[in-house]
Amino acid sequence: MIENEESKFAEANITSDKISHHGYHRFYPTFLYKFKDVSNIKILELGYESGHSIQLWKNYFKNPIIHSIDIIEDPKDPKLDAYFNVDQSNNEMLDSFCKCNTTKYQFIIDDASHIPDYQWNTFIRFVDMLSEGGVYIIEDIETSFWGISEFFGYEFDSHKTSILQKIEAIYHIINNEFISWDIQKKYGLSDLEVQALSQIETLTIAYNCLIFTKKDNSKYSRYYRTYEQYRFNNEVDKLKKKKFSKLNVLIKKLFKKIFFFTNTK
């Protein structure tokens, strides 16, 4: 089924380089297929450029509602339901957008500046706008391997700030149920980062992109346990095992006595 979806996703593309250059159709359908037949899925794409990928979403999804963010003037694209002029390098603008925009998106994709710290600063803010069970994709993470460099006129040093440096912290927060030590302190995370990462269900590292899915409390809240709950459950399990072990010993002793008396008659 997924192989068939790869073809359908590729066929939905016309001029975007998401397939021709990056080959994102190899894995995007695995995460986006669940939305394919959902009417009016809400999508936010960061980075309009020439609007090539907007047509891809229009072709692949069923009557999607698409919003776009960029630093260019409003392109007046009829395929867009809303356009916002927001500079990804400006945290105040990002915060303002999050505060004013009440839309919950099932799918958010960052194909904007490609600058590692801008990608990260956007993600930890915008994940709040993602609906439960939603998908957030950060494309073009190749810049995280470049070190001191420049792109689109932005200078950066990915040795100092790279989204890939956060992978270990994300991994631990996803599995925080089993961890007794202070994850925030160990990785020097801000409250905003912890709040954002605590909403993440899964992280997939793929070719030139990161794919996040958001927790779905309406379906799976019973699995989102704390370390205290994990420790309590472990103690209960240990107590049960201890009681069972004692009972097992008593049963063995009882059988020995029965065997002894049976054989001495």
Image: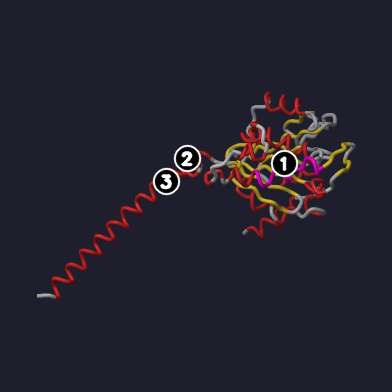
Quadrant of the image occupied by residue 62 = top right
Residue 162 is a magenta residue:
yes
Residue type beneath disc 3: Asn
Q: Residue at x 67, y 24 (%)?
A: 99
Q: CA distance from mark 2 to mark 1?
A: 35 Å
Label 1 sits on residue: 109
For numbered disc 2, what is the local secondary structure? helix
Q: Residue at x 85, y 29 (%)?
A: 73
Residue type beneath disc 1: Ile
Regarding residue 216, the answer to whether it shows in the image is yes
Label 2 sits on residue: 228
The reply, left or right, for residue 188 in relation to residue 226 is right
Residue 186 is a magenta residue:
no
**146 or 90: nearer the viewer:** 146
- Are the residues at dot 1 and dot 3 in contact (C-beta closer than 8 Å)? no
Q: Which quadrant is the N terminus positioned in?
A: bottom right
**Percent position of residue 48, x then y:** 80, 38
**Percent position of residue 211, x then y:** 68, 47
Mark nearer the viewer, 1 or 3 = 3
Query: Circle 3: is it few (<14), some (14-19), or many (20+) Cα within 10 Å?
Result: few
**36 or 178: nearer the viewer:** 178
Span shown in magenta = 158-169
Query: Circle 2: is it few (<14), some (14-19), or many (20+) Cα within 10 Å?
Result: few
* Earlier residue among tags 3 and 2: 2
Label 3 sits on residue: 233
- Are the residues at dot 3 and dot 2 in contact (C-beta closer than 8 Å)? no
Residue type beneath disc 2: Glu
